Image: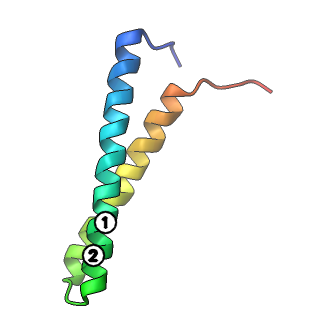
Amino acid sequence: MPKLDMLQELQLRTQLQTFIQQHRDLDTAILSLEETGKSDPLQLRRLKKMKLDLKDKILRIENMLIPDIIA
């Protein structure tokens, strides 16, 4: 993978922080809906899928930011 320049790295780090915050927000929303006991199962499923998608994006960006170390 090519080395990132400073601007690309800054953009990725900013995007990473945004995705992490969105992931936390979804986690809070899911927990809140589950605690009420009156949640729509379809809505919960959609929120959980969104959370998983964000987790994948977070991991992808982290892998781009962390250089591979040859052991």
Q: Is residue 67 above or below residue 59?
A: above
Q: Is residue 3 above or below residue 38?
A: above
**Residue 1 pos. (x, y %):** 53, 19
| Cα distance in 3D space between marks 1 and 2 | 6 Å
Q: Residue furthest top?
A: 5
Q: Residue at point 40% right, 10% down? A: 6
Q: Residue at point 34% right, 12% down? A: 7
Q: Is residue 27 above or below residue 13?
A: below
Give the labeled residue for mark 2: 32
SS at badge 2? helix
Which is nearer the eye, 1 or 13?
13
**Residue 27 pos. (x, y %):** 34, 64
Q: Residues within 10 Å of mark 2 (few under 14, many from 20)?
A: few
Q: Residue furthest right?
A: 71
Q: Residues within 10 Å of mark 1 (few under 14, many from 20)?
A: few
Give the labeled residue for mark 1: 28
Q: Is residue 68 visible?
A: yes
Q: Given the image, on which type of amino acid does mark 1 rest? A: Thr
Looking at the rendered structure, the number of numbered marks drawn on it comes to 2
